[in-house]
Image (tube, grey):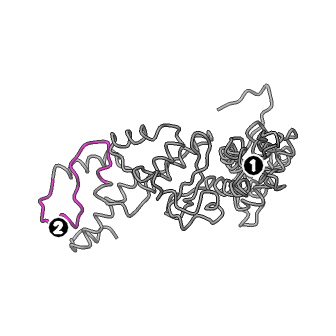
Amino acid sequence: FLLPHTKSWKFIIEVPYSNVCGVGVKENFNQILPILSIIFSSTLEEITDENYQLSIAKEEELVARFLKAYDDRTIDRISVTTNDGIDIDVSFEPITNADQCCTYIYNCIRKYAPDLPKNKIYELSFTKFLYRRVRFFEKHYYRGNQTIKRLGSIAMQQMINEAKSLTQINFRDSHYPRVYLVYDPEFSLHLLHGDWNHVSSDLKSLLGTNDPLKSEYYAKKDYYAECLAWLINIKYETFMKIVHETKFILTENFAYKLFHVHERKLTKLALIIEDLENDDEDEAELLNQRPTQMPALPAAAQQAQNNESIDDVLLKEIEQSLKNEEFKKTILYHIWKTILNVSTENATGFNSNFN
């Protein structure tokens, strides 16, 4: 495309960079885009925390305000009652200096999330996820607290850990964080977890020593559904009605994925939903995950065992779908894997063609 030449334009180029290689950002830019580096050598400017600071608005100020309280340890104050019986809730003055707000946010990232990639997208994501959480400190559960010790510092440390993990979450394996604070509509604290033994003693001190999943309240409720209903802001009964009508099975793994998807939606951050990459999925099931209707394809081992006849119509449909490039790469992978397995197990004459 062509830009009007009647005015000057400023371009921001994201350069692939890793400090593991020991090459600076500007040097890496010179190697990747040598012509641009020569033409604009006098006007190139590297984006840093100093010359392109995080934009401070209402959300960022709120994050900085409670990071300041966490830093100076005033966040553990509790509500007090005067002799006249008046409750004085905990509150903190807004920070009016934008540079000071930036300092608290950047210091938090450097201290508690030093392994986050050094770029603006991750900084913004971290701050957005943290804002979603620090609103808890504006609600009565925290401001009116008179009994729970260290409520502020324990909650804030968990919030920082959550913001850090959500910023770079990865569902490619099962080793992702499973302990998250969740809030009901009144912003009371609850806990989403997969194993009570993996919950820290500090968090247990806020919620009691017993696993909430085993409480009488959840004896006839789906705990994951309850947490997701709070997050999505709909009634539990409505959530379960949708689950039953769609015959949807809410597994633990999928509950966490839904949790992450909706967290990003609420922060208004971009979301990339990746294709299925689990090699352990059943091949027959994957082959049937197509928009067109066709009979189920039995797994090779089952077909051999049951001595079923070959379904020529089905194979013809699959052949046509392959020609039309209708399959996703995961399904193609499992078709190819099935062909190789069958040719190997049956020692057919054509398996040499695959080498």
Magenta residues?
A: 287-311
> What is the magenta segment's predominant secondary structure?
loop
The location of residue 49, given as percent across then percent down, is 82, 49
The quadrant of the image that shows the C terminus is bottom left
Q: Which mark is residue 143?
A: none
Secondary structure, mark 1, is helix
- Work out whether residue 342 or residue 92 is closer to the camera in this orientation and state it: 92
Where 162 sits versus 134, above or below? below
Look at 53% across and 58% down and name the residue there.
193
Determine if the magenta segment contains residue 87: no
Residue 141 shows up from this direction: yes
- Work out whether residue 104 or residue 120 is closer to the camera in this orientation and state it: 104
Q: Amino acid at mark 2?
A: Ala
Q: Quadrant of residue 280?
A: bottom left
Q: CA distance from mark 1 to mark 2?
A: 61 Å
| Residue beneath disc 1 | 35
Look at 85% across and 41% down and name the residue there.
95
Q: Which mark is residue 304?
A: 2
